[in-house]
Image: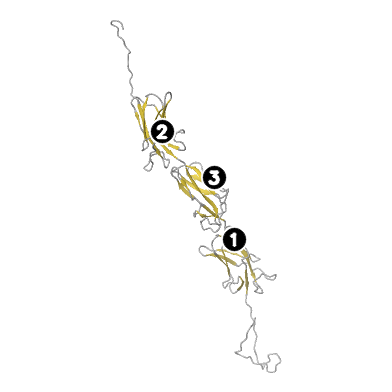
């Protein structure tokens, strides 16, 4: 400087570095909020990457909290967390990042990261031959069946059962209620034992739910012929006619009966029988006796399996016959009851087959 010179503009711009803090936590229901049951994730690397220059990193504490210090004010930073194999509920950006452009000395808080793992549901779809809601040794898995998880909102997730009937639905979002169903056309469901054959599941982060099995069965049927057994030999011979309009009933040990009426030729079919249930099959036959079946109460019994069509449950009915006449004193032994021949009372008459 020269004598008397007044130098100006020698300014000093001072700033304090800034910081960003938050919590990395397990978001069990993926609701983007740290609820009482959500735990902090320790040891996670959180990185502040500037638009130019070197990144700054830190690791989360035992409770999942972190603080990144030394950020230069006025610089745009992208804040990210290591989360391989996990999805981000908060922030809800596609790449799970926060952005921050701090001012001098600013302490930014609340840059939280909610992480979750998708969940899964698995089970087996099987043919429940006796409809007992359990996969017994003789029950086979059903392959190629489509199993669907449908959320209250959003897209459904589907899979197909393997050769042994097993399935696994993956990629389910925790905290979302899903309806789990299987394609079954005309089949009934023994398990789950509810009207629409549906499981309802709301899973937590990373949960692998097992045992959502589907036991399917087809309704069974019993058929036969009700006929007039003219010679009561228990067989429908050429001269024996079918009896039309007869009511045939299948009565289970518990539950509702199923009835049908014989056709013009005496044939009948009872549909919709539940497999594994014992039914008593009977026919209306007031005033008639039964040649077949030869049970005292003229009933058949049947315990069908899934989809089984039982045939030959026939009913042979007959009416008893009678023989009548007079025992008399044949005074002139002419083999004719003449006017003077009197009847003989109290004589035992026997029919010997």
Mark 1 or 3: in front is 3
Q: Earlier in the sequence, mark 1 or mark 3?
A: 3
Mark 1 to mark 3: distance in Å?
A: 33 Å
Between 350 and 9, the one nearer to me in the picture: 9
Classed neighbour count for the residue bearing mark 3: other residues with Cα under 10 Å, few (<14), some (14–19), many (≥20): some
Q: Which residue is the extreme one toward the left?
A: 4
**33 left or right, relative to 187:** left
- The residue under label 2 is 45
Residue 113 is situated, as x and y percent measured from the top left of the image, at 40, 35
Q: Is residue 140 above or below residue 90?
A: below
Q: Is residue 273 above or below residue 122?
A: below
Percent across and percent down for residue 33 are 39, 39
Confirm or deny contact between disc 1 and disc 2 (CB under 8 A): no
Identify the disc placed on residue 159.
3
Q: Residue at the location (50% across, 47% down)?
A: 122
Residue at 64% across, 69% down = 227
Q: Which mark is in front, 1 or 2?
A: 2
Residue 126 appears in the picture as rendered: yes
Question: In front of the other: label 2 or label 3?
Answer: 2
| Helix, strand or loop status at disc 1 | strand
Q: Do the numbered discs 1 and 3 sit on residues whose CB atoms are within 8 Å?
A: no
- Answer with mark 2 or mark 3, whichever residue precedes in sequence: 2
- Local secondary structure at mark 2: strand
**Residue 295 sits in quarter:** bottom right
User: Is the residue 63 above or below the residue 194 in the image?
Assistant: above
Q: CA distance from mark 2 to mark 3?
A: 36 Å
Residue 56: quadrant of the picture: top left
Image vertical order of residue 74 relative to residue 229, above or below = above
User: Which residue matches tag 1?
Assistant: 221
Q: CA distance from mark 1 to mark 2?
A: 66 Å
Colour logic: secondary structure
């Amino acid at each position: 400087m020269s004598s008397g010179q007044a130098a100006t503009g020698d300014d000093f711009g001072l700033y304090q570095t800034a910081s960003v803090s938050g919590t990395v936590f397990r978001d069990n229901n993926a609701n983007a909020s740290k609820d009482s049951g959500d735990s902090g994730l320790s040891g996670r690397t959180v990185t502040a990457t500037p638009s130019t220059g070197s990144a700054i990193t830190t690791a989360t504490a035992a409770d999942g909290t972190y603080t990144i210090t030394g950020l230069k004010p006025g610089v745009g930073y992208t804040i990210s967390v290591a989360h391989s194999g996990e999805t981000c509920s908060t922030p809800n950006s596609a790449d799970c990042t926060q952005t921050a452009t701090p001012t001098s000395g600013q302490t930014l808080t609340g840059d939280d990261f909610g992480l979750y793992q998708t969940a899964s549901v698995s089970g087996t779809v099987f043919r429940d031959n006796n409809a007992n809601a359990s996969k017994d040794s003789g029950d086979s898995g059903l392959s190629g069946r489509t199993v669907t998880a449908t959320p209250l909102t959003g897209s459904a997730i589907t899979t197909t059962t393997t050769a042994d009937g097993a399935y696994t639905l993956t990629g389910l979002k925790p905290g979302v209620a899903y309806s789990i169903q299987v394609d079954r056309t005309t089949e009934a469901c023994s398990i789950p034992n509810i009207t629409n054959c549906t499981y309802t599941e709301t899973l937590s982060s990373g949960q692998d739910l097992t045992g959502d099995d589907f036991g399917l069965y087809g309704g069974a049927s019993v058929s036969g012929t009700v006929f007039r057994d003219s010679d009561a030999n228990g067989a429908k011979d050429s001269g024996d006619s079918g009896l039309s309009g007869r009511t045939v009933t299948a009565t289970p040990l518990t539950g509702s009966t199923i009835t049908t009426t014989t056709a013009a030729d005496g044939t009948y079919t009872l549909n919709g029988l539940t497999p594994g249930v014992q039914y008593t099959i009977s026919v209306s036959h007031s005033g008639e006796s039964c040649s077949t079946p030869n049970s005292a109460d003229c009933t058949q019994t049947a315990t069908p399996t899934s989809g089984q069509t039982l045939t030959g449950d026939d009913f042979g009915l007959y009416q008893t016959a009678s023989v009548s006449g007079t025992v008399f004193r044949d005074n002139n032994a002419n083999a004719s009851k003449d006017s003077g021949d009197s009847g003989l009372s109290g004589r035992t008459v026997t029919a010997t087959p």
